[in-house]
Amino acid sequence: MIDLRSDTVTKPSDEMRAAMMSADVGDDVYGDDPNANSLEERVAGLFGFEAGLFTPTGSLANQLAIRQLVKPGDELLTETFSHIVRAELGAGAVFSGITTRTWESPRGLLSATDPLHIARPNSGPYQVSTAAIAIENTHNFGGGTVQSIDEIRKLREESLKLGISLHLDGARIWNAHVASGVSFLEYGSYFDTISVCFSKGLGAPVGSVMLSNKERNVSARQWRKRYGAGMRQIGMLAAAAHFALDNNIERLSIDHAHAQSLARAVHAVADHVINPQEVETNIVILNLSGLLTDANDLSAALKAAGILSSPVGPKILRLVTHLNISDEDISKVNSVLPDLIESALEA
Ligand SMILES: *Cc1c(COP(=O)(O)O)cnc(C)c1O
């Protein structure tokens, strides 16, 4: 099967497994795990932060971060289709009493004026006060879109004036960096907290890091334990993340080229289904509106040809490229998918 459902399906390579096998370990709840400690320091240094905290998932890294920035009853603003509000099952409300309001933007692309327009800090005793804004880069459901650094900079300048904190959901910040050339240090300079994932395109089996200042890190470490995610000999997981940082960042450009190739092949037969110029990283979103098929049927037809995809809406099919997808796999998909789409065009 050629699995294009997500970049979370990546499996650790033999070399990554070897690095995990030989990792030094210690009890991380005692602060004794050498690889967890060095990974936290390394990622913090990469983005110019004081401290990092290893977490099993990106969702937990997001949740630990936003609860540092938003008091119970205050609000977090985020884009309507962001992971924090669409895919974390209300965790901010359930665990931290955080209320949210959202703005919607085409393809998830940030325009700084959108959150600034609805932001209401210091709203007094009768209305909800905005404490933080979260943005996602790349934007997953937006189609792997890369946020404009000018809009991020503008949002930082204006939100600082309002006393509003900024969180970056950087699950795929690696892809954004490779596509935009913007350095990790520059990305880091605009945010109070950041979450990053090693378990997506970087190919590690598990793991994320939450970045913040030292004080927030101490508090987040307590909350991580309270949530039941104080882990012990996690050096093997941290070693996989180290391996991913050493070996799997620059190669993301291959995944981006593969996504581009898929988009062009589909565009050649049906130009309204996908615009290749909007495919900036490793996520391809096909819009099947007006076609005589829907996402479930097309996904089933692809599956019959040995290709897995994700229907993410009635007429929206998502394909994600990653390090277990080869040039040959892409050729195979390009020999099947455009034909299926062409046969679903209205006569
Ligand atoms: C995958 C992802 C996360 C974290 O997901 P987990 O499955 O909890 O690791 C967070 N944000 C975005 C945008 C993601 O795509």
Image: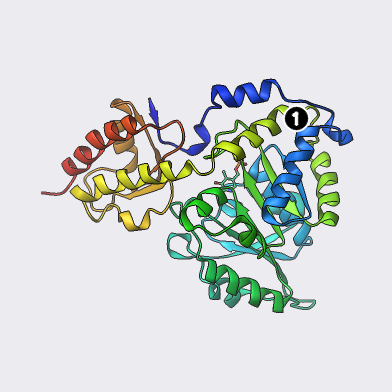
In the image, 272 versus 150, the foreground residue is 150
User: Residue at label 1?
Assistant: 234
Residue 66, percent across and down?
72, 56
Which residue is at a point 17% across and 47% down the rendered structure image? 345
- Amino acid type at circle 1 is Ile
Furthest toward the right, the residue is 30
User: Coloring scheme of the render?
Assistant: rainbow
Which residue is at a point 25% across and 56% down the rendered structure image? 272
**209 with respect to 343 (left or right):** right
**44 with respect to 293 (left or right):** right
Residue 117, percent across and down?
58, 77
Furthest toward the left, the residue is 347
Residue 70, percent across and down?
75, 62
In the image, 58 versus 147, the foreground residue is 147
Tag count = 1
Q: In which quarter of the view is residue 24 placed?
A: top right
Within-10-Å neighbours for mark 1: few <14, some 14–19, many 20+: many
In the image, 315 versus 220, the foreground residue is 220
Residue 278, percent across and down?
36, 57
Q: Is residue 53 visible?
A: no
